[in-house]
Image (tube, rainbow, N blue to C red):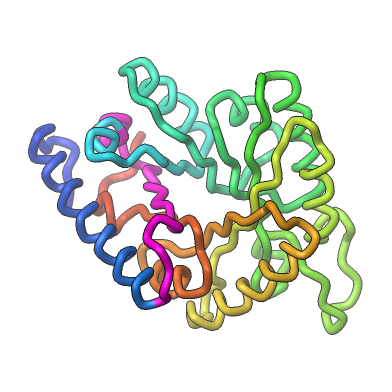
Amino acid sequence: MTEPTLGREERRAELAAGLARIRARIADACAAAGRDRGEVTLVAVTKTYPASDVELLGSLGVTEVGENRDQEAAPKARAVAAAGGRVTWHFVGQLQRNKCRSVVGYADVVHSVDSVRLARALAEAAQRHRDRPLDVLVQVSIDGDAARGGALAPDPAAGAVEPDRLLAEVAAAVAGSGSLRLAGLMAVAPLGWQPAAAFERLAGIAARFRVDHPTATALSAGMSADLEEAIGYGATHVRVGSALLGKRSTLR
């Protein structure tokens, strides 16, 4: 759909059209769920797209931007800052502990903390290299499959779970750190699941989670293909890439 040689004004027009479609989908989903449109934040996931796209999105009013690889996100964040862009950066991908120091240098929100060890590494990096707390969402597993990633909610039928991956323990590690702020939960609908069933289960997990963490109200769920179902079950942030930015060759 989109090629790297596309002119800047043509690309801006293309992004504007994609944005109009996504905003309409979000508005319609909110209306169908009886929710206020202002309750849902669009996070434009710009992995494999250049910094110039982030700048163009900013000119269209989109300043919440998601990235999932530090090796791409860090230089992109620097380039956008150098161009005068003001962006709230969301790190939404799997995070390795050895990347924490880099990520805390540019990210405003990290969506993917799913272990106590990762929470502690991120807290240490944030304490050393930031002057304000870092917002964190705990990634939770919807289907309870530890191999897919995500902290695990208690399930008596599943047997013992390593404490490092227990949702309650991960949340406690984040909340107990002075350098992190527990903002809520994030999840991805498992492969093979109907989105409505996945997000219904997530809504139940989130409701129980908020009993112990009433201020952790963010719920990051839903992407290009399933944002309507996610909004219907309470998502406050939807992470949209291809439906907004189109198909593009991977950056080198």
Residue 108 colored in magenta in the image: no
The magenta region covers: 33-54
Residue beneath the point at 42% across and 76% down: 33
Q: Quadrant of the C terminus?
A: top left
Residue closest to the eye, 162 or 9:
9
Instruction: Point out residue 63 in the picture as x, y percentages from the top left corner.
Output: 37, 37
Residue closest to the eye, 181 or 7:
181
Residue beneath the point at 48% across and 77% down: 195
Q: Is residue 155 above or below residue 246?
A: below
Q: Is residue 177 above or below residue 197?
A: above
In the visual, does 173 lie left or right of 14?
A: right
Residue closest to the eye, 149 or 89:
89
Residue beneath the point at 66% across and 25% down: 132
In the visual, does 161 lie left or right of 52?
A: right
Q: Is residue 93 above or below residue 6?
A: below
Instruction: Point out residue 59 in the picture as x, y percentages from the top left corner.
Output: 23, 33
Residue beneath the point at 54% across and 83% down: 197
Residue closest to the eye, 230 or 7:
230
Instruction: Point out residue 30 in the picture as x, y percentages from the top left corner.
Output: 38, 69
Residue 213, quarter of picture: bottom right
In the visual, does 105 lie left or right of 78?
A: right
